[in-house]
Image: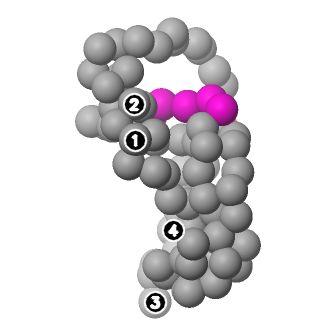
Amino acid sequence: MKCSVCKDKMIQRQDVIELKINGKLFLVENVPYEECLSCGERVLAPNVSQEIFSKVTRKEYREKQMFVPVVENIKARAV
C-alpha cells in the first residue's frame, strides 16, 4: 500500500497506538496497522478500527493509572 499523504511505501507493524475518543485517551495494545516510513502516517484496516470502537463502546477495557509528562504555558505563536 502507498501512503495517502506522501505516496511513499507503507509497512506492516503491530504496536501500541493512542486514540482520543470523546475526549478520553485510550492506549490500545498489539494493534496491527500500516505505517509510512517517510511521514509516519498510520492506517488501521476497517475491521481493526471497528473492533477497537466496539470494545470501547461495550466498555471492554481495563483502566490503569499512568503518569504522563505535560508541557504547559507555551508562549510562542504559530507563524
Foreground mark, 2 or 3? 2
Q: Amino acid at mark 3?
A: Val
| Residue 3: image location, x then y, percent | 55, 77
Q: Tell me which segment is drawn in magenta.
A: 25-30
The structure residue drawn at horizontal position 41% and vertical position 12%, both measured from the top left corner, is 60
Q: CA distance from mark 3 to mark 1?
A: 39 Å
Q: CA distance from mark 1 to mark 2?
A: 6 Å
Q: Earlier in the sequence, mark 2 or mark 3?
A: 2
- Look at mark 1 in the image and give the residue it sits on: 47
Marks 4 and 1: CB-CB under 8 Å?
no
- Look at mark 4 in the image and give the residue it sits on: 75
Marks 1 and 2: CB-CB under 8 Å?
yes
Q: Classify mark 2: helix, strand or loop.
A: helix
Residue nearer the viewer, 17 or 2: 2
- Look at mark 3 in the image and give the residue it sits on: 79
Q: Is residue 51 left or right of residue 66?
A: left
Q: CA distance from mark 2 to mark 4?
A: 40 Å
Foreground mark, 3 or 1? 1
Residue nearer the viewer, 78 or 26: 26
**Magenta part mainly helix, strand or loop?**
strand
Q: Is residue 9 above or below residue 66?
A: below
- Look at mark 2 in the image and give the residue it sits on: 51
Q: Which mark is residue 12?
A: none
Foreground mark, 4 or 3? 3
Foreground mark, 2 or 4? 2
| Residue 2: image location, x then y, percent | 57, 78
Q: Amino acid at mark 2?
A: Glu
Foreground mark, 4 or 1? 1
Q: Classify mark 1: helix, strand or loop.
A: helix
User: Callout 4 environment at 10 Å: few (<14), some (14 to 19), or many (20+)?
Assistant: few
Q: Classify mark 4: helix, strand or loop.
A: loop
Q: Earlier in the sequence, mark 3 or mark 1?
A: 1
